[in-house]
Image (tube, rainbow, N blue to C red):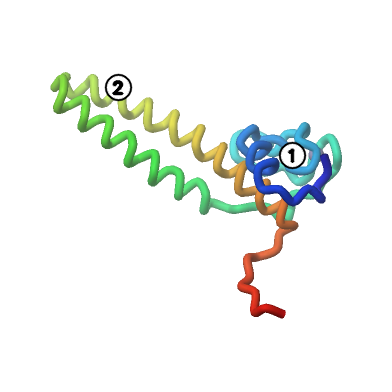
């Protein structure tokens, strides 16, 4: 499949797997959240597709709500000692943020590549 494929599902699925939106095989990131300059397989330039920190902040806010809700539910149901909360929720919070931020960053970067870096515009019917 090529970068000319304009369907939205393909780049989202490739982004969730942290793979190149063009070929679906090359890795999207070097390290953990750093976008590679280009695809190692097909050479697609990723420079115009960096979504910056926006997706990560959005996901962290949602996952924070989920973790806090779960912590309150456990407290009301079982009332464990505080050290259990500290061990359980800090680890769950860090792990969930890391995974969710990477997945969302990849999805947004792939969506940007799919739209070829164009910003959204309102059509005036021209
Ligand atoms: Zn590629």
Q: Quadrant of the N terminus?
A: top right
Q: Is residue 80 above or below residue 69?
A: above
Q: Position of residue 3 (x, y in %)?
A: 80, 48
| Disc 1, SS | loop
In the image, the residue with mark 2 has its CB under 8 Å from the nearest atom of ligand 1: no
When the figure is inspected, residue 89 is found, relative to residue 20, above or below; the finding is above
Residue 105, position in %: x, y? 58, 44
Q: Residue furthest front?
A: 125
Q: Earlier in the sequence, mark 1 or mark 2?
A: 1
> x, y percentage for residue 18?
65, 35
In the picture shown, does residue 5 fall above or below 73?
below
The x and y percentages for residue 90 are: 33, 29
Q: Which mark is residue 112?
A: none
C-beta proximity under 8 Å, tags 1 and 2: no
Q: Return the residue at label 2.
A: 87
The residue tagged 1 is: 20
Q: Give the quarter the ligand 1 occupies.
A: top right
Counting other residues with Cα less than 10 Å from the Cα at mark 1, is it few (<14), some (14-19), or many (20 or more)? many
Mark 2 secondary-structure assignment? helix
The quarter of the picture where residue 75 lies is top left
- Residue found 45% across the figure and 44% down from its top: 59
Q: Residue, x 37% and y 25% (percent of image)?
A: 91
- Ligand 1 within 8 angstroms of badge 1 C-beta: yes
């Amino acid at each position: 499949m090529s970068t000319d494929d304009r369907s939205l599902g393909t780049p989202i699925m490739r982004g969730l797997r942290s793979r190149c939106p063009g070929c679906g095989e090359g890795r999207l990131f070097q390290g953990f959240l750093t976008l590679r300059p280009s695809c190692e397989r097909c050479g697609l330039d990723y420079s115009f597709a960096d979504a910056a920190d926006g997706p990560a902040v959005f996901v962290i806010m949602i996952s924070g709500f989920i973790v806090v809700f779960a912590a309150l539910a456990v407290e009301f149901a079982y009332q464990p000692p505080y050290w259990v909360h500290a061990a359980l929720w800090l680890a769950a919070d860090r792990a969930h943020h890391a995974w969710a931020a990477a997945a969302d960053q990849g999805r947004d970067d792939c969506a940007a590549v799919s739209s070829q870096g164009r910003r959204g515009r309102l059509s005036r019917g021209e």
